[in-house]
Image: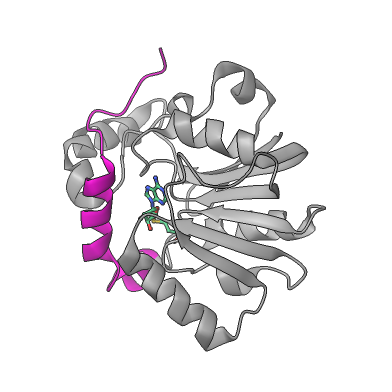
Amino acid sequence: MPPSPHTALNADAVKLAYRRWAMVYDTVFGSISSFGRRCAVTEVNRLPGTKVLEVGVGTGLALPSYNFDKRITGIDLSTDMLKKARQRVARHNLSNVENLFEMDAEATDFETGSFDIAVGMFVASVVPNPDRLFAELKRVVKPGGHILFVNHFLAQKGMRYYIERVMAPASKALGWHPDFSIESLLPPEALQRAVLQPVRPFGLFTLVHLVR
Ligand SMILES: C[S@@+](CC[C@H](N)C(=O)[O-])C[C@H]1O[C@@H](n2cnc3c(N)ncnc32)[C@H](O)[C@@H]1O
């Protein structure tokens, strides 16, 4: 069994947490996570294929950075975060953002093989069941397509490991799991094939890339 985070967040807890976060999310979290987001979108932009699914699109911070030939569908559980994303799309006139749906990334309405690329930025440690998230992305991405995540994963040792363990009980208030391990997301076979790249600041986040 993969180690699972101490405190599980269910869908209602996610919605409640992000109702609170929506107003201040960009100010509080936007800049610390910007490099990781940029790395993931740069990778998406250089990959073949045009149909992109962004899961946990949030306030849509990444949306203006996609190349215009990428046709984006974004989904999120939180009405309040999506409202911000829709405002951003209108503000930047992002006609390549085709859809923004309120939808659970663990169980989407999309047909099998609908997308060339799926990307989840800072969402894997928030969803109630990360293993189901990965299984669903595998289903909706075409064989030969690409699955990317950028996320914070539990440190293996050292001071960060202890800090993250201590912070774990605050998961509900934070809206993410500080003690989230990569094994909770990827089964061993996928973990073996995944390309992992630490990203700034301080390698706190990791870019994960898998070919479907
Ligand atoms: C930390 S925010 C990341 C937002 C955005 N990806 C970014 O880079 O700023 C996590 C987002 O995932 C969403 N989320 C959590 N669980 C989800 C699920 N099962 N399906 C869809 N979205 C989910 C939350 O509502 C929230 O907007």
Nearer to the camera, 138 or 164: 138
Quarter of the rendering containing residue 68: bottom right
**Left or right: residue 189 compared with residue 178:** right
The residue depicted at 21 percent of the width and 39 percent of the height is: 167
Quarter of the rendering containing residue 78: bottom left
Nearer to the camera, 118 or 101: 101
Counting labels gives 0
- Coloring scheme of the render? one colour
Question: Which residue sits furthest right?
Answer: 48
Quadrant in which the N terminus appears: top left
In percent of width and height, residue 56 lies at 45, 54
Quadrant in which the C terminus appears: top right
Q: Is residue 207 above or below residue 57?
A: above
In magenta stretch: residue 15: yes
Part of the protein shown in magenta:
1-29
Question: Which residue sits furthest top?
Answer: 1
In percent of width and height, residue 47 lies at 78, 52
In magenta stretch: residue 149: no
The residue depicted at 25 percent of the width and 31 percent of the height is: 165
The residue depicted at 40 percent of the width and 67 percent of the height is: 82
